[in-house]
Amino acid sequence: MKSDSEPRPSVLYEPASEAMGARAKADGLETGTPDRNRKTDADIAAAAENKIGWAAMAPTDSLKVLVRDGWVTLEGEVDWQFQKESVGAAVRVIRGVVGVSNTIAVRPR
């Protein structure tokens, strides 16, 4: 049995998980590997607004983009069904988007 006065060995190695870039916290706040390509909600919202302005054939002044944890919610009104669909299609392909709720209403004619 070792006494408390004997020196304890120090750890001279790096755990494999750290060496390979894995990251985990015991407090439960963050686990998994770091993702350099991960986009913030603000990044996704900015990309969505840009993409809608260029790719979608819809009036951007009547649309609203909300992003939470990578999930995009589209709100507003358009004149035609194809406009609603083009906005949803434009946003789905943005890196970091995990899903889209397209709640855009088509104005009745």
Image (cartoon, grey):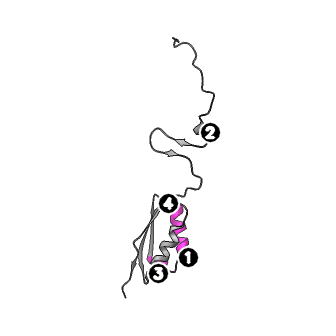
- Report the disc number at residue 1: none
Specify the segment rendered in magenta. 38-62
Which residue bears the numbered disc 3?
Answer: 82
Which residue bears the numbered disc 4?
Answer: 41
- How packed mark 2 is, by other alpha carbons closer than 10 Å (few <14, some 14-19, many 20 or more), is few
The local secondary structure at tag 3 comes to helix
**The residue under label 2 is which amino acid type?**
Ala
- Give the image quarter of residue 11: top right
Question: Is residue 40 within the magenta segment?
Answer: yes
Q: CA distance from mark 2 to mark 3?
A: 50 Å
Which residue bears the numbered disc 2?
Answer: 19
Question: Which of label 3 and label 1 is nearer to you?
Answer: 3
**The residue under label 4 is which amino acid type?**
Asp
Q: CA distance from mark 2 to mark 4?
A: 29 Å
Residue 50: image x %, image y %? 55, 71
**The residue under label 3 is which amino acid type?**
Phe
**The residue under label 1 is which amino acid type?**
Ala
The local secondary structure at tag 4 comes to helix
